[in-house]
Amino acid sequence: MAEAAKWYVVHTYSGYENTVKATIEKTVESRQLHEQILAVSIPLETVTEITESGVSKTYDRKVFPGYVLVKMVYSDDTWHVIRNIRGVTGFVGTSSNDPTPLTEEEVYAMGVEKKEIIVNYAVGDTVRILDGPLSSFTGTVDSIEVENNSVTVIVSMFGRETPVEFELDQVEVISQ
Protein backbone atom coordinates (compact mmCIF):
# COMPACT_ATOMS: atom_id res chain seq x y z
CA MET A 1 0.00 0.00 0.00
CA ALA A 2 2.85 2.39 0.86
CA GLU A 3 4.20 2.00 -2.70
CA ALA A 4 1.13 3.86 -4.00
CA ALA A 5 1.88 6.84 -1.74
CA LYS A 6 2.74 10.09 -3.49
CA TRP A 7 3.56 13.60 -2.31
CA TYR A 8 0.74 16.14 -2.52
CA VAL A 9 0.83 19.88 -1.87
CA VAL A 10 -1.69 21.21 0.65
CA HIS A 11 -2.50 24.94 0.66
CA THR A 12 -2.88 26.51 4.12
CA TYR A 13 -3.64 29.90 5.57
CA SER A 14 -0.47 31.96 5.85
CA GLY A 15 1.28 31.24 9.13
CA TYR A 16 -0.69 28.02 9.76
CA GLU A 17 1.88 25.64 8.23
CA ASN A 18 3.27 24.35 11.56
CA THR A 19 -0.21 24.04 13.10
CA VAL A 20 -1.50 22.12 10.08
CA LYS A 21 1.52 19.80 10.13
CA ALA A 22 1.10 19.09 13.86
CA THR A 23 -2.66 18.51 13.48
CA ILE A 24 -2.16 16.08 10.57
CA GLU A 25 0.42 14.16 12.59
CA LYS A 26 -1.92 14.01 15.63
CA THR A 27 -4.82 12.85 13.44
CA VAL A 28 -2.66 10.10 11.88
CA GLU A 29 -1.75 8.91 15.40
CA SER A 30 -5.28 9.01 16.82
CA ARG A 31 -6.97 7.39 13.81
CA GLN A 32 -4.16 4.88 13.09
CA LEU A 33 -3.68 6.15 9.53
CA HIS A 34 0.06 5.31 9.32
CA GLU A 35 -0.55 3.14 6.23
CA GLN A 36 -2.37 5.90 4.31
CA ILE A 37 -0.60 9.10 5.43
CA LEU A 38 3.12 8.41 5.68
CA ALA A 39 4.82 11.79 6.09
CA VAL A 40 4.21 15.51 6.45
CA SER A 41 6.86 18.09 5.56
CA ILE A 42 7.41 21.82 5.50
CA PRO A 43 10.48 22.47 3.28
CA LEU A 44 12.90 24.83 5.05
CA GLU A 45 16.09 26.55 3.99
CA THR A 46 18.79 27.89 6.30
CA VAL A 47 19.37 31.60 5.77
CA THR A 48 22.20 33.69 7.19
CA GLU A 49 21.65 37.42 7.42
CA ILE A 50 24.20 40.00 8.42
CA THR A 51 22.63 42.78 10.46
CA GLU A 52 23.59 46.45 10.19
CA SER A 53 25.85 46.03 13.22
CA GLY A 54 27.76 43.28 11.37
CA VAL A 55 26.41 40.37 13.43
CA SER A 56 25.41 37.31 11.41
CA LYS A 57 22.10 35.70 12.29
CA THR A 58 21.12 32.23 11.02
CA TYR A 59 17.55 30.95 10.91
CA ASP A 60 15.31 28.54 9.02
CA ARG A 61 12.86 30.03 6.52
CA LYS A 62 9.96 28.27 4.81
CA VAL A 63 10.75 27.65 1.15
CA PHE A 64 7.04 27.67 0.21
CA PRO A 65 5.08 29.78 2.73
CA GLY A 66 1.43 28.76 2.87
CA TYR A 67 2.09 25.17 1.76
CA VAL A 68 2.60 21.81 3.47
CA LEU A 69 3.69 18.63 1.67
CA VAL A 70 1.93 15.37 2.55
CA LYS A 71 3.00 11.89 1.42
CA MET A 72 -0.13 9.79 1.30
CA VAL A 73 -2.12 7.18 -0.55
CA TYR A 74 -4.84 9.28 -2.17
CA SER A 75 -8.41 8.18 -1.43
CA ASP A 76 -11.70 9.81 -0.45
CA ASP A 77 -10.87 9.09 3.22
CA THR A 78 -7.39 10.66 3.16
CA TRP A 79 -8.71 13.60 1.12
CA HIS A 80 -11.41 14.25 3.77
CA VAL A 81 -8.96 13.89 6.68
CA ILE A 82 -6.57 16.49 5.23
CA ARG A 83 -9.25 18.79 3.78
CA ASN A 84 -11.12 19.07 7.10
CA ILE A 85 -8.11 20.13 9.17
CA ARG A 86 -8.36 23.67 10.50
CA GLY A 87 -6.14 26.00 8.45
CA VAL A 88 -6.22 23.90 5.25
CA THR A 89 -7.76 25.66 2.26
CA GLY A 90 -7.35 22.78 -0.18
CA PHE A 91 -4.99 20.72 -2.30
CA VAL A 92 -2.95 22.05 -5.20
CA GLY A 93 -4.18 20.57 -8.49
CA THR A 94 -6.55 21.12 -11.36
CA SER A 95 -9.34 21.51 -8.79
CA SER A 96 -9.30 21.22 -5.00
CA ASN A 97 -11.19 17.91 -5.40
CA ASP A 98 -8.58 16.51 -7.79
CA PRO A 99 -5.08 17.04 -6.32
CA THR A 100 -2.06 16.57 -8.56
CA PRO A 101 0.80 14.57 -7.03
CA LEU A 102 4.36 15.87 -7.31
CA THR A 103 6.69 14.09 -9.72
CA GLU A 104 9.77 12.29 -8.36
CA GLU A 105 11.99 14.97 -9.90
CA GLU A 106 10.06 17.73 -8.10
CA VAL A 107 10.28 15.86 -4.78
CA TYR A 108 14.06 15.38 -5.08
CA ALA A 109 14.61 18.94 -6.30
CA MET A 110 12.82 20.26 -3.20
CA GLY A 111 14.96 18.06 -0.98
CA VAL A 112 11.91 16.48 0.65
CA GLU A 113 13.21 12.97 -0.01
CA LYS A 114 16.69 11.85 -0.81
CA LYS A 115 17.59 9.15 -3.28
CA GLU A 116 19.94 6.61 -1.80
CA ILE A 117 22.84 6.29 -4.18
CA ILE A 118 25.26 3.44 -3.69
CA VAL A 119 28.75 4.57 -4.64
CA ASN A 120 30.70 1.61 -6.00
CA TYR A 121 33.80 3.58 -6.96
CA ALA A 122 36.57 5.21 -4.94
CA VAL A 123 39.16 7.97 -5.32
CA GLY A 124 41.62 6.92 -8.02
CA ASP A 125 39.17 4.68 -9.92
CA THR A 126 38.61 5.16 -13.64
CA VAL A 127 34.96 6.00 -14.37
CA ARG A 128 32.76 6.55 -17.41
CA ILE A 129 30.56 9.64 -17.47
CA LEU A 130 26.95 8.65 -18.16
CA ASP A 131 25.13 11.97 -18.42
CA GLY A 132 25.58 15.53 -19.62
CA PRO A 133 27.74 17.12 -22.30
CA LEU A 134 30.71 14.90 -21.39
CA SER A 135 28.78 11.62 -21.57
CA SER A 136 30.93 8.68 -22.72
CA PHE A 137 34.14 10.47 -21.60
CA THR A 138 36.28 8.67 -19.06
CA GLY A 139 38.23 10.12 -16.18
CA THR A 140 39.77 9.47 -12.79
CA VAL A 141 37.86 10.07 -9.55
CA ASP A 142 39.56 12.90 -7.64
CA SER A 143 37.15 13.33 -4.71
CA ILE A 144 33.75 12.08 -3.52
CA GLU A 145 31.31 14.06 -1.35
CA VAL A 146 28.37 11.77 -0.60
CA GLU A 147 26.58 14.34 1.60
CA ASN A 148 26.63 16.87 -1.29
CA ASN A 149 25.80 14.22 -3.93
CA SER A 150 28.91 15.16 -5.90
CA VAL A 151 32.01 13.53 -7.34
CA THR A 152 34.94 15.35 -8.92
CA VAL A 153 36.44 13.57 -11.92
CA ILE A 154 39.69 14.54 -13.68
CA VAL A 155 38.89 14.47 -17.39
CA SER A 156 41.41 14.93 -20.19
CA MET A 157 40.06 17.57 -22.60
CA PHE A 158 42.02 19.27 -25.36
CA GLY A 159 45.25 17.81 -23.96
CA ARG A 160 44.63 19.20 -20.46
CA GLU A 161 43.60 17.52 -17.22
CA THR A 162 40.44 19.30 -16.04
CA PRO A 163 38.50 18.65 -12.80
CA VAL A 164 34.76 18.38 -13.50
CA GLU A 165 32.04 17.99 -10.86
CA PHE A 166 29.17 15.52 -11.37
CA GLU A 167 26.32 14.09 -9.34
CA LEU A 168 27.11 10.68 -7.85
CA ASP A 169 24.81 8.80 -10.25
CA GLN A 170 26.23 10.49 -13.37
CA VAL A 171 29.34 8.27 -13.41
CA GLU A 172 30.00 4.53 -13.25
CA VAL A 173 33.17 2.59 -12.58
CA ILE A 174 34.79 0.92 -15.57
CA SER A 175 35.22 -2.75 -14.70
CA GLN A 176 38.81 -3.85 -14.94
Image (cartoon, helix red, strand yellow):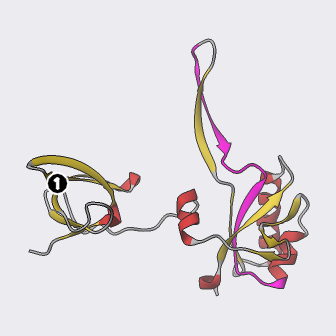
Magenta-tinted stretch:
54-76
> Quick one: which residue is furthest to the bottom in this view?
1
| Residue at point 89%, 57% (across, down) | 87
Could you say which quadrant of the image residue 67 lies in?
Answer: bottom right
Position of residue 56 in the picture relative to residue 33 (left or right) = left
Which secondary structure lies at badge 1?
Answer: strand
Residue 122 x, y percent position in the rendering: 20, 60
Q: Quadrant of residue 127?
A: bottom left
**How far across and how far down the image is residue 117, in percent?**
38, 68
Amino acid at circle 1 = Val
| Magenta stretch contains residue 62 | yes
Residue at 40% across / 52% down in the picture? 148
- Position of the C terminus, as image quadrant, is bottom left
The image shows residue 136 at horizontal and vertical percentages of: 21, 68
Q: Residue at x 18, y 47 (%)?
A: 162
Q: Nearer the viewer, residue 135 or 150?
A: 135
The furthest residue to the front: 158
Examine the structure image and report whether residue 78 is included in the region drawn in magenta. Answer: no
Query: Residue 40, percent across and down?
Result: 70, 64
Residue ID for mark 1 = 155
Placement of 78 over or under 45, stated as above or below: below
Q: How many marks?
A: 1
